[in-house]
Image: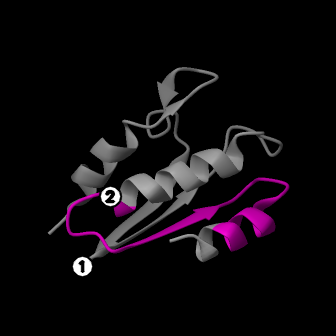
């Protein structure tokens, strides 16, 4: 079974290209929940207008689903001017 520590380790591999710091240590991730083969979390970009918000959110989801024993990843973006559109795209993506 996947642990929260393993999720955090995966998130630390995702680097914000503007700062070269990983998204977890930047404090952009909260509310991590692991239940069986599913992970959910909240992602808050560095700015409400972050041009990489959708790219980072999709990358987070893709990386989580690639983890062993994980079939579902629910990534919710908050604090972004286009959060409704991005969250809709995240729900529709595999």
Residue numbers of the magenta segment: 65-89
Percent coordinates x, y for residue 87 in the rendering: 68, 68
Distance, label 1 to label 2, CA atoms, is 15 Å
State the image quarter where residue 56 is shown: top right
Name the residue rendered at 83%, 42% in the picture.
49
Count residues near mark 1 (Cα–Cα under 10 Å), then give few for <14, some for 14-19, many for 20+. few
Percent coordinates x, y for residue 83 in the rendering: 76, 62
Query: Which sits in the foreground, 48 or 16?
Result: 16
Name the residue rendered at 59%, 26% in the picture.
17
Which callout, 1 or 2, points at the residue further toward the start of the chain?
1
Name the residue rendered at 72%, 62% in the picture.
86
Q: Are the residues flagged by discs 1 and 2 in contact, CB closer than 8 Å?
A: no
Count residues near mark 2 (Cα–Cα under 10 Å), then give few for <14, some for 14-19, many for 20+. few
Q: Is residue 8 part of the magenta span, yes or no?
A: no
Give the side of residue 87 with respect to residue 57, left or right. right
Give the side of residue 80 with respect to residue 23, left or right. right
Percent coordinates x, y for residue 92 in the rendering: 62, 76
- Residue 54 versus residue 90 in the image, above or below: above
Q: Across the whole image, how many numbered discs are drawn on residues?
A: 2
State the image quarter where residue 58 is shown: bottom right
Query: Which sits in the foreground, 54 or 24?
Result: 54
Residue hosting label 2? 66
- Residue 77 versus residue 37 in the image, above or below: above
Q: Is residue 82 part of the magenta span, yes or no?
A: yes
Name the residue rendered at 37%, 37% in the picture.
12
Residue hosting label 1? 36
Under circle 1, the secondary element is loop
Percent coordinates x, y for residue 89 in the rendering: 68, 68
Q: Which mark is in front, 1 or 2? A: 2
- Give the farthest residue toward the left: 1
Give the side of residue 55 with respect to residue 62, left or right. right
């Amino acid at each position: 079974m996947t642990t929260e520590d393993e999720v955090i380790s995966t998130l630390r591999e995702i680097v914000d290209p503007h700062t070269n710091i990983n998204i977890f240590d930047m404090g952009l991730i909260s509310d991590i929940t692991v239940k069986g083969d599913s992970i959910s979390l909240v992602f808050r970009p560095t700015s409400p207008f972050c041009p990489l918000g959708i790219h980072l959110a999709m990358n987070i989801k893709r990386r989580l689903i690639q983890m062993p024993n994980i079939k579902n990843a629910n990534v919710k973006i908050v604090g972004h001017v286009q959060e409704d559109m991005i969250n809709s795209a995240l729900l529709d993506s595999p």
